[in-house]
Amino acid sequence: MSVYRGKHMWIWEVASTLSGDVQSIISLGQRLGIDGFLVKSHDGTTVLSQFSKVVKPLQQAGFMVGAWGFVYGSQPTAEAQAAQQGIDAGADWYVIDAETAYDGKAPEATVFGHALRTKNPHLVIGYAPFAFPSLHPQFPYTAFSAFCDVCLPQIYWAEFGQTVTSAFDQSIAELKPLGHPIAPIGQSFAAATAAEIEQFAVLAHQALCPGISYYDLQSASSVQLQAIKNVTVYPAPSYAHASATSGSTPATSGSTSATSGSTPATSGSTSATSGSTSTPTSAAGSSSASTTPSVTPSPSAVTRSLPVTPSDVSTSDWFYAAVTDLLKLGIVTAYQDGLFKPNETITRAQAADWINRLRIYLEKASGLPIA
């Protein structure tokens, strides 16, 4: 199982997450049904002791634990050494959070990556860039892609002032040419609604993303956490790797990023990274992104599992208990309009999806893979 497969939660400040109580974090993670945590291990060259304090207890509780660090690019070798301390502490994988500070620093990204790969040739390394390359022409997406295994774009739709679908589709379409698996980061702070949080997971599942994560645990409201708990569609059944295309280096600036700094705020294209807020020159909804290809799901597609009873399923129906139970477990799904349509025929593809959801549920319940 890939370390980034499944549903994960980000932790920025352990001390501000459930008062820093590791057992409380473990209990919450178990209630949310997540597969792993991503815990900040360094900020630039500054190593944070919080990672080494939580990595082993979280792993012993059954979670995958990734270390992540915010990097600036001014001292790439020293930053790689700081990242290495989290890796040496026992991280299952490592994720780079590079943002506007890395604009125009492709050589530095190469130095950083070489230092990491020299010491960790088999470690899974990801990077969490801005969601939309078209808005970040200075950012060295290609340089990071050269040594990373997975891309985790920060798709913070509410911050961009976009719908979940438009933000997700634009990001995936722009990042697929890089050729890596995409395990997107969703928003669980500020104005993100419960419905949007669940819809994000559905879109990622439909796009066959191998995993998802939400930023971040300390900022999420109880309503947002309940929505994350409702997400039961992971891991995705398979992942079709996009073929890399040659051409222009993906771009940079505009999307929100919540990484090493303060809790994400505002809207549009705020960057909350090392504590300061910067306003990019172009916003997420600007015309520069208007020509981006969109991959809109078919309106007739089965799109989401519902924690409530669809309006066309009545308590007097003989199949009521079976339908509602399986909907709540995420094994069967309703249509995009929220109806179950009990007399509707389903396609072979839909049947395969439901059977696969059953497999995923049984694997999670038993802790054993089903061949």
Image: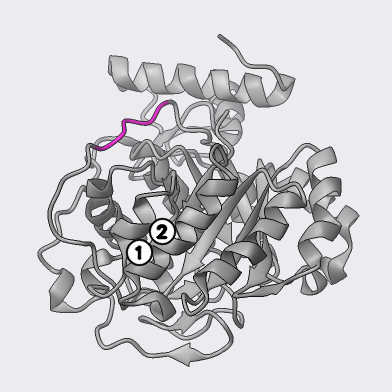
**Which is the main secondary structure of the residues drawn in magenta?**
loop
Residue 188 % position (x, y): 56, 65
The quadrant in which residue 367 appears is: top right
Residue 240 % position (x, y): 31, 30
Q: Is residue 127 visible?
A: no
Which numbered disc, 2 or 1, marks the residue that appears first in the sequence? 1
Above/below status of 93 relative to 54: above
Q: Viewer-proximal residue, 309 or 108?
A: 108
Residue 124 % position (x, y): 54, 42
Q: In percent of the image, x 29 and y 57: which residue is there?
A: 142
Q: Viewer-proximal residue, 326 or 88?
A: 88
Residue 69 % position (x, y): 60, 66
Residue projecting furthest to the top: 371
Q: In the drawing, does residue 104 fall left or right of residue 287?
A: right
Q: In the drawing, does residue 302 fall left or right of residue 188?
A: left
Q: Which residues are magenta?
A: 238-242
Q: CA distance from mark 2 to mark 1?
A: 5 Å
Other-residue count near label 1 (Cα within 10 Å), few / some / many at <14 / 14–19 / ≥20: many
Q: In the drawing, does residue 239 fall left or right of residue 316?
A: left
Q: Is the C-beta separation of discs 2 and 1 under 8 Å?
A: yes
The colour scheme is: one colour
Amino acid type, callout 2: Pro
Amino acid type, callout 1: Ala
Q: Give the labeled residue for mark 1.
A: 131
Q: Viewer-proximal residue, 160 or 241?
A: 241
Above/below status of 344 relative to 93: above
Q: In percent of the image, x 36 and y 60: which residue is there?
A: 164
Q: Give residue 153's mark.
A: 2
